[in-house]
Image: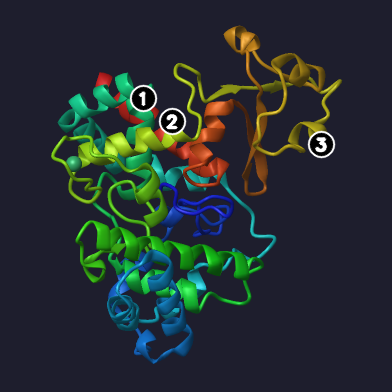
Amino acid sequence: MATLMYDARARLSLILCIALALGLSASWAAQPKSKRKAGANAASVLYADRADAMRVADEIAERRNLDRDWVRSIIGQARLLPQVTRWVLPAPSGTPKNWRVYRSRFIDPVRIRAGVAFWQAHQAALERAEQVFGVPAEIIVGIIGVETIYGRNTGNFRVVDALATLSFDFPQAHPRAAQRRAFFQDELEQLLSLAQRSDTDPLQLRGSYAGAMGLPQFMPSSWVKYAIDFDGDGRIDLFDSPADAIGSVANYFVAFGWNKGMPTHYPVRFDPAVLDLDALLAPDILPTFSADAMAAKGALLDGAARQHAGPLALVELENGGGEPLYVAGTENFYVVTRYNWSSYYALAVIELGRAVAEARER
Ligand SMILES: [Ca+2]
C-alpha cells in the first residue's frame, strides 16, 4: 500500500504481516493468502451499538462539515473484524527475519509473467510516468506487482469494516496501540471525506485488512494526497484505471524525494581489518555515510559506486540463521521504503521490477 501507513506520516506503512517481515506496513501484500480471503466473515458486532464509535462519528462530521446522520449511518453499519485485530500484532520478538524466504514470495514466475503482461499492456502510461516524474517503469511495475499482483489481489474486506475495527478495537497488546488507533481513526475520517467529495458509497469500497485500496494499495490519506488522474478522464480511479495507478505511484515517489537517474543500491563487500559493523548499522536504513566514510569503516564499494555523490546506508537483510545480505542503499532506496517501511519490502520491489524488465528482454 502505498502509503499505507506510517506512523509518522501516513500511507501505507502498515503491519507486519509475516513473521519475517518487518513492521507494519503496507504489506498486506505479504500476508498469507488465507488472510486475504477471509474478509467476508464479519462478526456480529455492529458499530451502531457502540457509543464510542458514534461519538467519533459526531466528531468527524463536525470537523469535516459532513452530514451527521450520514456519518453515523456509515460507521454504524461497519462491523468488527475480529481476525484483523490479531493480524496487526507484531511478530513475536525473536522471530528471525529471512530475506530469501521473503523474496521467494514475490519474485516468482507467476508474478513475473503477470508483470510482463502488465508492462506490455500499459507501456505508454509507464513511459509517460517515467518522462513526467523521472521514476523508472520497473520501479512502478515492482510496486504494483508486490502489492496486488497487478490488480489480481486488491483485497476483499470492506474498507469501512477494516478501518472501524482498527479505529475502535485496535489491540491493546500492540506496543504502539494508541498511536496506531489514532492513525486508523484519521484514515477512517479521510475515507469518509473522500467518499463524500467523490460521490462514492464508502460501504462499497473493498481493500486490504488494513484499509488499503486499489492496484497500488493506497490508504485513504495517500489517495487524498498523492493519487492523480493519469488517463485524463477527469476522475481518479485506482481500482480500475491502471494508468491512474501508475501515475499515482510515480507521484507518490516524487513526493517522497525520488532522484531521477539515481540507482537504488549497490553491492558492498567488507574489509575485515577495519570493519565497524555496529557503526555502519547504527543509522539503520537512513542514508548517512559518504562512499568514503563507508569505506573507512570497512564497507567497500566498487567501480562507479565509489563516485556516488549522496549519502548511503548499509542495509542488512537477515537470512534466518544464515549469513545476512548487505547492500549499500542510496536515498532512492530510502524513498522506496516510504511506500512501506521495510528494507525487505523495498528490495523485493526493486528485484521484482528488475526481473520483469529482464524477462521482457528475453
Ligand atoms: Ca482517471
Against 69, is 97 above or below? above
Q: Which residue is mark 3?
A: 278
Three-letter code, disc 1: Phe
Three-letter code, disc 2: Val
Quadrant of ligand 1 in image = top left
Three-letter code, disc 3: Asp
Percent of width and height locating residue 130: 32, 22
Q: Which mark is first along the chain, 3 or 1? A: 1
Q: Which residue is mark 1?
A: 133
Could you say whether the residue bearing mark 1 is in a helix, strand or loop?
Answer: helix
Disc 3 to disc 2, how far (Cα)?
32 Å
Q: Residue furthest left?
A: 233
- Tell me the number on the disc at residue 227: none
Q: Which mark is first along the chain, 2 or 1? A: 1
Question: In the image, what residue occupies the spot 58% across and 8% down?
Answer: 304
Could you say whether the residue bearing mark 2 is in a helix, strand or loop?
Answer: helix
Task: Check mark 2 vs ligand 1: CB closer than 8 Å? yes or no.
Answer: no
Q: Nearer the viewer, mark 3 or mark 2?
A: 2
Q: Which residue is mark 2?
A: 254
Q: Nearer the viewer, mark 1 or mark 3?
A: 1
Instruction: Count residues near mark 1 (Cα–Cα under 10 Å), then give few for <14, some for 14-19, many for 20+.
Output: many
